[in-house]
Image (cartoon, rainbow, N blue to C red):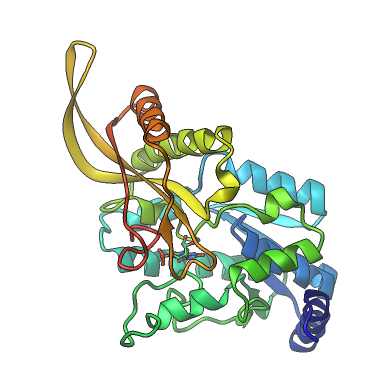
């Protein structure tokens, strides 16, 4: 019968067969999926694998440092960190359409990976932690007509002409199965339980134009929100929680003066696979506490709202 141990063995064999003696570049996002893919592929082909983590300037607070530490120190898997913030920010200038953002980011990721492939003397394969729901949601909405809801950066966001072939060992799995596989591969629980983070990062959590300044503002608010969630012991009860920064200014009052600043939205959902989701029912005091801290501590935000929309009809990310 079917077990994760057997799945691991099958995949290791398949990866060896597919790759042969060629080189593989694996795009790491720091999330569970790409990390599990990397560790599995490393088990299969060892030194033929190079992991690439792209810092596109759309990461959460301290995320780059956390990923570097984890891969270099704990797993001893060689990691190339590419500083691509300027390139991504320049390309996102003036872009407000969600699909245009996604397409640009997907394409630019590939450009960076192809550059890195050259540097290792030519890699024929690109590995990604694509899951089954990423595939489904990029092509059609379950049960509905065949329309694209969002081009996931590693599926519908891929450019048509790409030189590398894909290695996607998790393509048949749902998130809970990837987590099980991660445990099977010896990943610590704290890591396996990390909330998902999308490849396009903060770009799809800032409706409207993405700028470095907006990213910096959002990073601060998001870190406070997650800090409060961890302190309340709620992190593991939630599938995904994050802040969004709206391109809307409203009037407020701080001390004895008027403010005119941005609105921050907070999102938290429960789910098993990300395909459907329920709103996490925080109590009012918790949300009030978050709002107070964010407005007091983050310059540029003077109002906080909570998103009460399930999926469907909402999606988890705002873009
Ligand atoms: P939505 O917003 O479609 O999100 O309800 C469902 C889950 O997928 C994640 N997501 C992505 N992950 N690349 C990713 O790696 C993407 O382009 C992408 N878009 C959405 C989202 O964070 C949620 O967990």
> Is residue 198 depicted above or below 256 in this figure?
below
Residue 111 appears in the picture as rendered: yes
Q: Does 79 appear above or below 231? A: below
Query: Could you say which quadrant of the image residue 103 lies in?
Result: bottom left
Answer yes or no: is residue 38 visible.
no
Q: How many numbered markers are drawn?
A: 0
Point 26% across, 39% down: residue: 263
- Asked whether, in this view, residue 261 is left or right of residue 287, the answer is left
Query: How far across and how far down the image is residue 68, in percent?
Result: 69, 47
| Quadrant of the frame with the N terminus | bottom right
Q: Residue 224 vs residue 83: left or right? A: left
Residue 233, how many percent across, how many down? 59, 38
- Residue 65, quarter of picture: top right
Q: Quadrant of the C terminus?
A: bottom left
Identified at 27% across, 59% down, the residue is 95
Would residue 27 appear left or right of 248 to someone viewing this image?
Answer: right
The residue closer to the viewer here, 188 or 284, is: 284
What residue appears at the point 17 percent right and 34 percent down from the top-left corner?
A: 250
In the rendered image, residue 154, in percent from the top left (x then y), is placed at 51, 72
Q: Nearer the viewer, residue 244 or 156?
A: 244
Residue 89 drawn above or below residue 200: above
Rendered view: 118 above or below 192: below
Q: Nearer the viewer, residue 253 or 180?
A: 180
In percent of the image, x 51 and y 39: which residue is there? 226
Point out residue 120 in the picture as x, y percentages from the top left corner: 72, 68
Q: Which of the 4 image quarters holds residue 184? A: bottom right
């Amino acid at each position: 019968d079917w077990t994760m141990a057997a799945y691991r063995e099958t995949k290791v064999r398949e990866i060896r067969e597919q790759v042969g003696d060629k080189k593989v570049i694996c795009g790491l996002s720091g999330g569970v999926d790409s990390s599990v893919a990397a560790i599995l592929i490393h088990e299969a082909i060892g030194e033929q694998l190079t992991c690439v983590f792209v810092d596109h300037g759309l990461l959460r607070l301290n995320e780059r440092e956390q990923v570097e530490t984890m891969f270099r120190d704990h797993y001893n898997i060689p990691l190339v960190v590419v500083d691509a913030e300027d390139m991504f920010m320049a390309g996102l200038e003036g872009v407000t359409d969600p699909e245009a953002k996604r397409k640009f980011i997907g394409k630019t990721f590939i450009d960076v990976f192809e550059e890195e492939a050259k540097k290792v003397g030519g890699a024929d394969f690109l590995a990604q932690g694509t899951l089954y729901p990423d595939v489904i949601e990029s092509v059609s909405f379950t049960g509905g007509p065949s329309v694209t809801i969002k081009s996931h950066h590693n599926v519908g966001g891929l450019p048509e002409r790409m030189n590398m072939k894909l290695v996607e060992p998790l393509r048949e799995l749902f998130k809970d199965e990837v987590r099980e596989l991660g445990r099977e591969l010896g990943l610590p629980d704290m890591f396996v339980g990390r909330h998902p983070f999308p490849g396009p990062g903060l770009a799809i959590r800032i409706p409207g134009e993405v700028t470095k300044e907006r990213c910096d503002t959002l990073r601060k608010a998001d870190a406070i929100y997650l800090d409060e969630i961890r302190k309340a012991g709620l992190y593991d009860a939630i599938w995904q929680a994050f802040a969004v920064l709206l391109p809307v200014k409203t009037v407020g009052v701080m001390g004895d003066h008027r403010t005119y600043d941005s609105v921050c939205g907070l999102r938290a959902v429960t789910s098993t696979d990300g395909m459907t989701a329920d709103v996490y029912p925080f109590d009012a005091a918790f949300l009030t506490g978050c709002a107070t801290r964010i407005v007091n501590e983050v310059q540029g935000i003077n109002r906080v709202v909570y998103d009460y929309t399930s999926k469907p009809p909402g999606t988890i990310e705002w873009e």
